[in-house]
Amino acid sequence: MESPKRFLGAIFISFFYLAASLAFADHHESAHPIPVGHGPKLGLSPDFYKSTCPQADEIVVSVLKKAIAKEQRIAASLLRLLFHDCFVQGCDASVLLDDSEGVLSEKNALPNKNSIRGFEVIDEIKAALEETCPHTVSCADTIALAARGSTVLSGGPYWELPLGRRDSKTAYMKLANKNLPPPNATLHRLIKFFGRQGLDKVDLVALSGSHTIGMARCVSFKQRLYNQHRDNKPDVTLEKRFHYKLASVCPRTGGDNNITPLDFASPPKFDNSYYKLIVEGKGLLNSDQVLWTGKDPEIAHLVTSYAENESLFFEHYVNSIIKMGNRNPLLGYDGEIRKNCRRVNHVL
């Protein structure tokens, strides 16, 4: 039973991946990205590496194509890395640091542990960049380039990416525990989490659309299936057939690490089906579904708008992800350019 499904799934993903690769090439050739409403922060520029490493993006995309062809899910993992980096003291690659003397890794923070992934692909990209342009492209910009490339190769929008971030010399595990929104967050809490980053309701709804690709572990949404309000009952906002489908993957006991798509309508494709599913009561995480059920007219209107108009979603998404990426970067002589993204330069 599973075999034909996997075979057909592989054909679909291969076909989609080829189309996305061609689309990425078109973006570069046409040089007509979606207009941007937020200019780059002083010191950041899409041309930052134009003279020092003009082939940086080409190198990143080359590694990404191989990694995504091997495992489609890695695109979403790399996009998620950007969020988990930027929400903690700005986009400074602090999320990539391993434990070492004086460094408590953010990888061990509750929202990250056994959850964020893609570090090996970042290592591979960084090694390729170091080989061609030694000590030039920061790990922070490597994450940002990988996130954009992953979005485009999944069928999403291209954007002019301001570059020039430098890397932190430490990690912020306490801030990671404090600033990263949990999957069971209420709408009120989500608004507060995003507000801490200078992001508004439009940014919240648009950037939540990142969940149009990727997978989630059962532990992230199991309470919705069996004990939403600590009353041994499911979340009443869950569409019934969707609930039964999820329950077959995630039993009441055990199976916490079983995974299911965040957007089951088109798992590998970056599109607006995420919003269509939310309107139907088929958002996977509580933090997804509350965008529709949280009784905020402005947010509900945005969900409807994006469900009906993919171009509007893409336009807002681009504006919001650039806005997020421009928050509090390390510039000039602050921080450093790490040679190895997992450790600061003075650690051998």
Image (tube, rainbow, N blue to C red):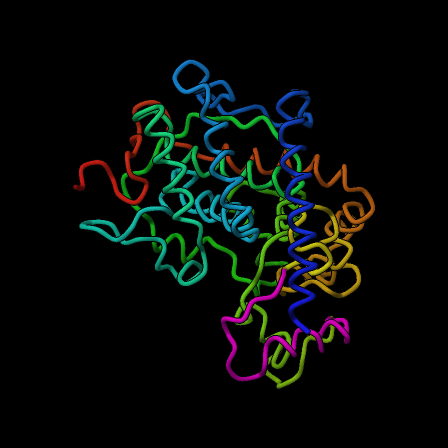
> In the current view of this chain or complex, which residue is farthest to the top?
51
Depicted 10 relative to depicted 197: above or below: below
Quadrant of residue 336 within the rendered picture = top left
Q: Position of residue 307 (x, y in %)?
A: 79, 49
Q: Position of residue 72 (x, y in %)?
A: 57, 51
Q: Residue at point 71% right, 54% down?
A: 266
Depicted 273 relative to depicted 158: above or below: below
Q: Is residue 243 magenta?
A: yes
Residue nearer the viewer, 275 or 293: 275
Q: Residue at point 45% right, 26% down?
A: 56
Depicted 210 relative to depicted 141: above or below: below
Residue nearer the viewer, 42 or 238: 238
Relative placement, left or right, of 2 versus 142 is right
Q: Is residue 263 magenta?
A: no
Q: Position of residue 3 (x, y in %)?
A: 65, 68
Residue nearer the viewer, 265 or 300: 265
Depicted 220 relative to depicted 341: above or below: below
Quadrant of residue 246 within the rendered picture = bottom right
> In the current view of this chain or complex, which residue is farthest to the right?
308
Is the C terminus in the top left, top right, bottom left or bottom right quadrant?
Answer: top left
Q: Residue at point 57% right, 58% down?
A: 189
Total marks in image: 0
Relative placement, left or right, of 207 versus 41 is right
Q: Position of residue 29 (x, y in %)?
A: 64, 21
Q: Which residues are magenta?
A: 238-261
Is the N terminus in the top left, top right, bottom left or bottom right quadrant?
Answer: bottom right
Residue nearer the viewer, 70 or 192: 70
Q: Residue at point 71% right, 46% down?
A: 271
